[in-house]
Amino acid sequence: MTGTGMNTERTVVHLIRHGEVDNPDGVLYGRRPGYHLSELGRRMADRVAEHLADRDVTHVVASPLERAQETAAPVAKSHGLTLDTDERLIEAANVFEGKTFGVGDGALRKPGNWRHLTNPFRPSWGEPYVDQVVRMMGALGSARDAARGHEAVLVSHQLPIWIVRSHVEQRRLWHDPRRRQCTLASLTTFTFQGDRIVSVAYSEPARDLVPAHLLAGAKPVKGKSKAFGA
């Protein structure tokens, strides 16, 4: 939880995962540029904007990556706001960027990649979980300050969203990626009283548009990468 402050206004910050990405090769695209929303992803973004249309949103921010910017754009437009960018909302760094992770045909079949899997608690294959907590909490705090007494929308990526939620809810940071409750175009909503987070909620306004194999806990399908952390 964040520290208490003198201000006791209620502020809501919605942390949204981007919509589906056009990724025909099924790679873990990570921070690579050039990955845009698919047609379905654009429908998801529109659905999120419709879901938030009547909310008191006064501040919209996104990760610098194209898929996040494109998901945030309809929300900003519907509220007549300028879309801002916060580098702290970017996807987690990962040594497996550009590689596939389909069942039976991914990068983990190559022994040379196993050295990156030695420490799942840090994790050894990418940006430390603690570093993600620090930057994401900073982004949440900045959005809270910009939207005091109102609501803010931040668009980011699955892993950083799940990690900061786990931190706030005082869960361990290492986890099974298949169990992340953070599907495409989902909202993880933090309510602040002053500077203190008093509740966390989760919703999926575009759930009916999400392919079944991408839902949390879904059984892996051969040839279809879940692009963990995307």
Image: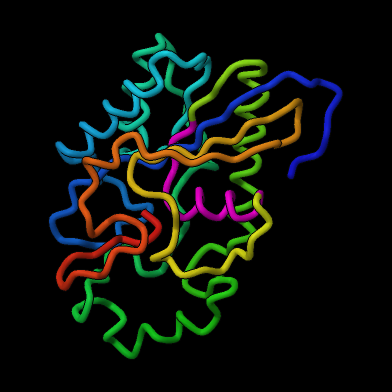
4, above or below 148, in the image: below
Q: Residue at x 16, y 73 (%)?
A: 222
Q: Along the horizontal axis of the image, is 72 left or right of 13?
A: left
Q: Residue at x 34, y 39 (%)?
A: 185
For residue 149, what is the image quadrant?
top right
Position of the C terminus, as image quadrant, is bottom left
Q: Position of residue 10 (x, y in %)?
A: 68, 21
- Name, please, the residue furthest toward the right: 6
Q: Residue at x 70, y 36 (%)?
A: 198
Q: Along the horizontal axis of the image, is 121 left or right of 218?
A: right
Q: Position of residue 207 (x, y in %)?
A: 29, 42
- Name, please, the residue furthest toward the bottom: 111
186, above or below 116, in the image: above
Give the image's coloring scheme.
Answer: rainbow
Q: Position of residue 28 (x, y in %)?
A: 30, 61
204, above or below 82, in the image: below
Q: Is residue 157 magenta?
A: yes
What range is drawn magenta here? 154-168
For residue 179, what is the image quadrant?
bottom left
Q: Residue at x 36, y 24 (%)?
A: 51
Q: Is residue 54 magenta?
A: no
Q: Along the horizontal axis of the image, is 12 left or right of 83?
A: right
For residue 122, what is the image quadrant?
bottom right
Q: Position of residue 77 (x, y in %)?
A: 34, 15
Position of the N terminus, as image quadrant, is top right
Task: Kindly report the secondary structure that dominates the magenta region of the rendered protein.
Answer: helix
Count how many numbered circles sit on residues in the image.
0
Q: Nearer the viewer, residue 139 or 220?
A: 220
